[in-house]
Amino acid sequence: MKKITKERLFFVLLSALLLAVEIFIGTRVHDAFVRPYLGDTLVVILIWAIIRIIAPRKAVWLSGAVFVFALAVETTQLIPLVDLLGIENRLIRVLMGTSFAFGDLIAYAAGCAVTFCADFAEYRKRKNREKAS
């Protein structure tokens, strides 16, 4: 199997696992830490993993882009955008969020730090292989 195909398969499996964990947290966990903070940390990792399925090698900028996207979504929660748009669908309201929380920004930053470290480690490994060749 080609290396790029293996990488994509890895990210498909990682995305499926993270999605299952997110669904479990969203439907079964009702606490003050796991759902609001761990869930937000994992959601940016999930978004990163989904994008890595499509672009497995173009990851230098990806963690930053995911963080900017998460900030944009959280910023829309400063104004009640879902209410202004009249969105009543529960799933869409959950995905877009209905209230701003500064702690969410910290959770997003933590998740993006994890993805950045993974991307940086992969980048260094690839560069070392290229030097050895």
Image (tube, grey):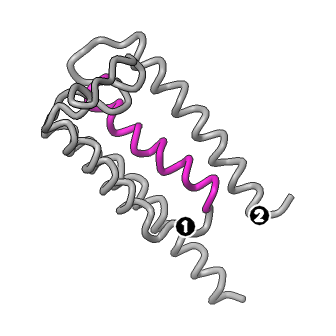
Task: Give amino acid for label 1.
Answer: Glu
Looking at the image, is 107 positioned above or below residue 72?
above
Q: Position of residue 91 (x, y in %)?
A: 42, 21
Q: Position of residue 50 (x, y in %)?
A: 56, 47
Q: Quadrant of the N terminus?
A: bottom right
Looking at the image, is 44 positioned above or below residue 100?
below
Within the magenta stretch, is there residue 43?
yes
**Residue hosting label 1:** 122
Which sits earlier in the primary sequence, circle 2 or circle 1?
A: 2
Task: Give amino acid for label 2.
Answer: Lys
The span shown in magenta is 34-55
Q: Position of residue 110 (x, y in %)?
A: 29, 48
Mark 1: few, some, or many residues within 10 Å (few <14, many ≥20)? Answer: some
Within the magenta stretch, is there residue 3?
no
Distance CA(mark 2)–CA(mark 1)? 13 Å
**Residue hosting label 2:** 3
Tag 1 secondary structure: helix
Q: Quadrant of residue 82?
A: top left
